[in-house]
Image: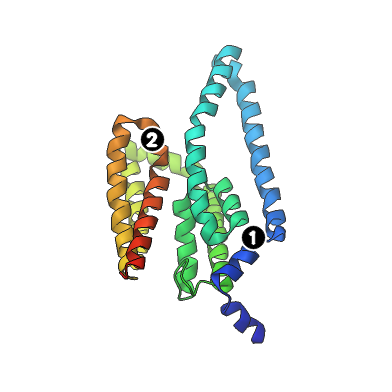
Amino acid sequence: MNNMFLLDTMTNKAYLEIANTPMLWAMVIPTVIMVCIQAYIFIRDAVKAGPLVGLTASDTKEAMRAGAICSIGPGLSMFTVMVAMMSLLGGPFAWLRLSIIGTIVTEMLGATAGATAMGVDVASADYGITAFTCSVWVITLNTWGFFIVNLLFAHRVEKVKMAIEKHDTKMFDAVGLCVMIGCISMFLAGQMVGGTPKFVAAIAGFVVMIGLLKVSDKHPKLREYNLGIAMLIAIFIAQYVSEMGG
């Protein structure tokens, strides 16, 4: 009981010290290495398959170079959102999750769900080691959902998609988009009633993202940075409102 009490009363600083321990780094490194090995295998097999689809060695090199250049933007964008995630979940776990999933939206939804299950908010004064552990479990188990669904249904979904697209070519994508909007809206609504700073952060993030999307129409290269920029601006605005007594 005393140990549980100590765990539950750990401050943010204490839980982040645990979240950034060398042991956690050692635990996540093998998984990231496996991701790198998988990427190498895909690239190697793609190069070998080039001649089978009519690509010359020059075409393959040009495609690889174009892909490498195009990855710079998403990579920098990922670095931006990783900094924000590291401040909440620590360096090792943020590095691991963004190496596997690559989207902070999915990861933060899981972190929020885990914290909510413990009756606290992410990054609040009450978010300690127990809530952090719960967030880690939710995020990790969420990955298994992807694996199981892909294993059981991925080869069948394509048939369903083809059947739907015979009647409406946009219906399948529209349903998927609506599901994502519904999930994000549910979590966002729960956060917006948590105080003025959170409400302001949500509105500011929405307004900034709309503006960035307009700018991206004229400057497509900026599109990959939209999420990171909107998050940072919303965080700064919310912090300002909080310090002003909002």
Nearest the viewer among 76 and 56 is: 76
Q: CA distance from mark 1 to mark 2?
A: 32 Å
How far across and down, in percent of the image, does residue 200 sit? 30, 61
Residue at the image point whose x is 49% and y is 62% from the top: 111
Q: Which residue is mark 2?
A: 222
| SS at badge 2 | helix
Residue 126 left/right relative to 20: left
Residue 240 left/right relative to 45: left
Residue 44 left/right relative to 101: right
Whether residue 52 is visible, yes or no, is no
216 w.r.t. 126: above or below: above
Residue at the image point whose x is 66% and y is 82% from the top: 3
How far across and down, in percent of the image, does residue 240 sit? 35, 61
Q: Amino acid at mark 2?
A: Leu
| SS at badge 1 | loop
How far across and down, in percent of the image, does residue 76 sit? 50, 39
How far across and down, in percent of the image, does residue 121 sit? 44, 70
Q: Earlier in the sequence, mark 1 or mark 2?
A: 1
Nearest the viewer among 193 and 138 is: 193
Residue at the image point whose x is 30% and y is 64% from the top: 199
Give me the disc on residue 96.
none
Count residues near mark 1 (Cα–Cα under 10 Å), then give few for <14, some for 14-19, many for 20+: some
Q: Quick one: quadrant of the N terminus?
A: bottom right
Q: Which residue is mark 1?
A: 20
Residue at the image point whose x is 50% and y is 67% from the top: 114
Asked which quadrant contains residue 19, the reply is bottom right
Q: Amino acid at mark 1?
A: Asn
